[in-house]
């Protein structure tokens, strides 16, 4: 049975370090061996400051590095940001300062190895450093996600797909939320982090996972060697049916969800704001395109906030964004509703807007019998 440890804490470093060390030592103390190479994989999506609650907090990364060093192992902090340089992100969110003076390697993923993740995707290029590490400490952030409802421990492993390969896979699998969830689950199973410790101290609710979301204090650190159990317990804490998270629904279908026990007091979080997701794709496949186009929320731009930085059109896997004199416009025929643009916008200028078709459909679904 999987164990999920829950502890209340804050970003006060003395308190945080004590709690972090206790969780990791209990769960994976025997798996971090002296001399081994330990990959620490935070969420380093794009440049943001800790108060934005978009990235794993730098003090959690610091605690992980200090723990690995104390075990006599060699820590490496890596990720593959969706856009922008890893170095800049480390600097901007304070990780560079937090890790100053510690013997740690901080580098973005660069090389890949080809891994067979099974049908229907078969072979995919995954970061070599992740596949060849002796142990992986996965440090996800608790955030909402426009397409996947929440981004937690399992989804954090998508960062092991490098740079623009992410966009390629979004285009191939992200057209259908369930297909994308299947891909995320398969990548997670291939990489298999040794332990996951989730930053739920300052979480992100609303239109996450980027700056469109709103920080929400929850004050918990949660850990498990079973990422799926961890993600399931997060849903329980937020009062969400775990099967409404596509990744967990797929995991349940393919019998990956194990029974678990919670160690510690799991708080109840009331009224956690979820994004408007495209959970309305159902029925025979030939209908999916129609439903996507007419019922899934549309990405829209607040032109007053847009600084024409170009990050959204650079990342868009469907090349569905064009710049205007002020702001951007979308080609909704091309758009696959992956919401990568919203996720990446550094100025919070993009958000999703429900369609009339989506509203009607939701009312029909929510209508009491
Ligand atoms: S919408 Fe955001 S990401 Fe796109 S150009 Fe404007 S500011 Fe940049
Ligand atoms: S416009 Fe935004 S939501 Fe649509 S495909 Fe491009 S990145 Fe994805």
Image: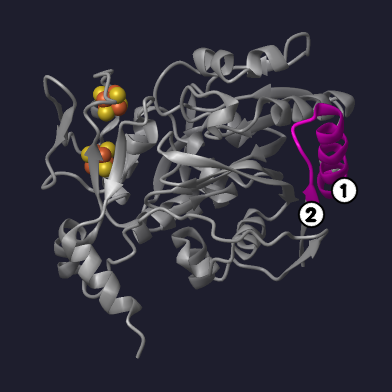
Q: Are marks 2 and 1 in contact (CB under 8 Å)?
A: yes
Spot occupied by residue 242 in the image (x, y as percentages of width and height): 54, 66
In this view, 86 is above or below 167: above
Q: Which mark is residue 99?
A: none
Q: Is residue 313 above or below residue 334?
A: above
Q: Quadrant of residue 114?
A: top left
* Colour approach in the figure: one colour
Residue 323, position as x, y percentages in the image? 15, 24
Report the residue that reaches farthest toward the front: 304
Q: Is residue 17 magenta?
A: yes
Residue plotted at (40% across, 38% down): 212
Mark 1 is surrounded, within 10 Å at the Cα level, by few (under 14), some (14 to 19) or many (20 or more) other residues, namely: some
Which residue in the structure is indicated by mark 2? Answer: 5
**Ligand 1 occupies quarter:** top left
Quadrant in which residue 125 is drawn: top left
- Confirm whether residue 254 shows in the render: no
3D distance between C-alphas at marks 2 and 1: 9 Å
Question: Dot 2 lies on which element?
Answer: strand
Q: Residue furthest top?
A: 101
Look at 66% across and 56% down and name the residue there. 230
- Look at discs 2 and 1 and give the one toward the viewer: 2
- Front position in the image: 65 or 120: 65
């Amino acid at each position: 049975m999987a164990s999920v440890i829950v502890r209340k804490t804050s970003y006060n470093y003395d308190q945080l370090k004590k709690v972090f060390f206790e969780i990791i030592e209990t769960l994976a103390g025997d798996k971090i061996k002296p001399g081994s190479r330990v990959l620490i994989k935070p969420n380093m999506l794009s440049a943001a400051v800790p108060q934005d609650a978009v990235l794993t907090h730098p003090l959690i990364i610091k605690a992980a590095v200090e723990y690995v060093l104390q075990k006599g192992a060699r820590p490496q902090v890596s990720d593959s940001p969706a856009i922008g340089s890893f170095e800049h992100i480390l600097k901007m969110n304070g990780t560079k300062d937090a890790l100053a003076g510690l013997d740690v390697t901080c580098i973005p993923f660069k090389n890949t190895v080809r891994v067979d993740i099974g049908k229907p995707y078969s072979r995919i290029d995954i970061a070599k450093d992740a596949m060849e590490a002796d142990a992986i400490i996965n440090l996800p952030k608790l955030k909402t996600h426009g397409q996947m409802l929440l981004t937690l421990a399992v989804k954090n492993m998508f960062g092991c797909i490098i740079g623009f390969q992410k966009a390629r896979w979004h285009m191939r699998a992200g057209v259908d939320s369930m297909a994308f969830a299947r891909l995320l689950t398969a990548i997670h199973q291939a990489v298999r982090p040794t332990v996951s410790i989730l930053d739920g101290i300052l979480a992100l609710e609303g239109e996450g996972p980027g700056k469109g979301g709103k920080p929400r204090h929850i004050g918990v650190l949660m850990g498990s060697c079973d990422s799926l159990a961890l993600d399931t317990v997060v849903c329980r804490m937020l009062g969400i049916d775990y099967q409404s998270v596509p990744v967990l629904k797929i995991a349940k279908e393919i019998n990956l969800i194990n029974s678990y026990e919670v160690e510690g007091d799991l708080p109840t979080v009331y009224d956690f704001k979820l994004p408007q997701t495209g959970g309305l794709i159902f029925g025979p496949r030939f209908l999916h395109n129609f439903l996507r186009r007419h019922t899934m929320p549309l990405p829209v731009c607040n032109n007053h906030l847009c600084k024409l930085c170009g990050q959204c059109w650079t990342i868009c896997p469907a090349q569905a964004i064009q710049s205007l004199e002020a702001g951007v416009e979308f080609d909704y025929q091309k758009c696959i509703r992956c919401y990568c643009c919203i996720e990446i916008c550094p100025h919070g200028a993009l958000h999703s807007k429900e369609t009339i078709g989506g509203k009607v459909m939701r009312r029909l679904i929510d209508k009491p019998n």
